[in-house]
Image: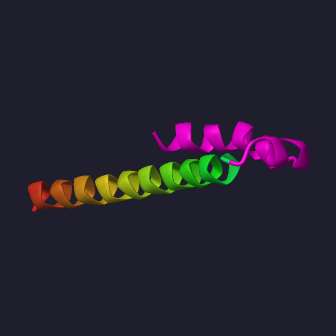
Amino acid sequence: MASSGSIFLGPAGYLQIPLYRQIWLLTPLIIAFAWLWACLWSFTTVISYLSVQAYARAAVA
């Protein structure tokens, strides 16, 4: 899921070209959504990894 947000940032970056920026005013919202998506799922991935690691440590102990 984090990768899909990062992949979405690539095409969304092209919307920063001045021609598209004047045509479409929703460009900043799309780019903000892509950053939010990538950061949120990256955070979720890290927290999931840490919790699985903690459960594994508890199971071994």
Residue at 13% x, 56% y is 60
On the picture, is 4 further left or further right than 53? right
On the picture, is 57 further left or further right than 32? left
- Taking the magenta stretch, the answer to whether it contains residue 4 is yes
Instruction: Count every numbered label the image shows and give the total.
Output: 0
On the picture, is 4 further left or further right than 60? right
Compared with residue 24, is residue 54 higher up or lower down, i.e. above or below? Answer: below
Q: Nearer the viewer, residue 45 or 61?
A: 45
Q: Residue 57 at x, y = what percent?
A: 18, 60
- Taking the magenta stretch, the answer to whether it contains residue 20 is yes
Q: Residue 38 at x, y = what percent?
A: 52, 50
Residue at 41% x, 58% y is 43
Q: Residue 29 at x, y = what percent?
A: 60, 52
Residue at 63% x, 38% y is 7
Check the image and tell me how it is coloured.
Answer: rainbow
On the picture, is 24 further left or further right than 50? right
**Magenta residues?**
1-25
Q: Residue 47 at x, y = what percent?
A: 32, 59
Main SS category, magenta section? helix
Residue at 9% x, 62% y is 61
User: What is the quadrant of the N terminus in the image?
Assistant: top left
* The furthest residue to the right: 19
